[in-house]
Image: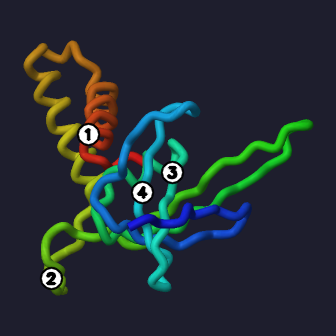
Amino acid sequence: MERPKLELEINKPTHIKLLFDEPIVGESQYGKYFLYAVSNGNGNEYSLFAHDSVHDVLKACPKGTEAIITKLAAQRGKKLVTTFSTEIVEKASKEELTVPNPKQPQTNPYLENMLQSFEDAIKVQEKFNGMANVNQLAVTMFIQRTKSNGLAT
């Protein structure tokens, strides 16, 4: 099925829903591209050639994830510079939807990663008889964990 290209209007938020888990990645005369199949919520399907910053947000999102993309423009001297704002509205789950248990406390992945990073940094410090800086180790571990877990945006 051939889908028309989704053209983003300047300063107009566009609501999309991903139709597949991964984009098509290719190379053209303009460089690398990321082609997403999306719908606009009205049953219309489009092809979205995502800017690198949009792809960085969408690449870890599964099929069914909804997002709002806004193309922003600003005048920088004589040049018009465009940037993109991408906000995840609803991230789809690859498992079946389940009703959340209200008795179960909500978890914060950033807090869990930070706590684990500090615990691990303290272990490293103990191993090296207090020679390591716990704060620097913990922050370094936290940054790596959030990047590798797809939490950094």
**On the image, numbered disc 3 is attached to which residue?**
50
Nearest to N terminus: mark 3 or mark 2: 3
Q: Which quarter of the picture shows residue 75?
A: top right
Whether residues under marks 4 and 2 lie with C-beta atoms below 8 angstroms apart, the answer is no
The answer to whether 77 appears left or right of 5 in the picture is right
Q: Residue flagged by tag 1: what amino acid is it?
A: Ser
Residue 108, percent from left and from top: 28, 61
Please, what secondary structure does the residue beneath circle 1 have? helix
Left or right: 128 as drawn, with respect to 80:
left
Q: Position of residue 64 (x, y in %)?
A: 32, 71
Pointer 2 or 1: first along the chain: 2
- Residue type at mark 2 is Thr
On the image, numbered disc 2 is attached to which residue?
98
In this view, the residue in front, 101 or 128, is 101
Which residue is depicted at the point 14% across and 71% down? 95
Amino acid carrying label 4: it is Tyr
- x and y percentages locating residue 85 in the rendered image: 59, 56
Q: Image height check: is 90 above or below 25?
A: below
Q: CA distance from mark 2 to mark 1?
A: 26 Å
Q: For the residue marked with disc 3, what is the amino acid?
A: Ala
Binning the other alpha carbons within 10 Å of mark 2 as few (below 14), some (14 to 19) or many (20 upward) gives few
User: CA gap, disc 3 to disc 4?
Assistant: 7 Å
Q: Which residue is mark 1?
A: 148
Q: Nearer the viewer, residue 137 or 3?
A: 3
Rendered view: 135 above or below 65: above
Label 3, secondary structure: give it.
strand
Q: Classify mark 1: residues with Cα within 10 Å, few (<14), some (14-19) or many (20+).
A: few
Mark 4 — residue?
A: 36
Say which of marks 1 and 4 sits in front: 4
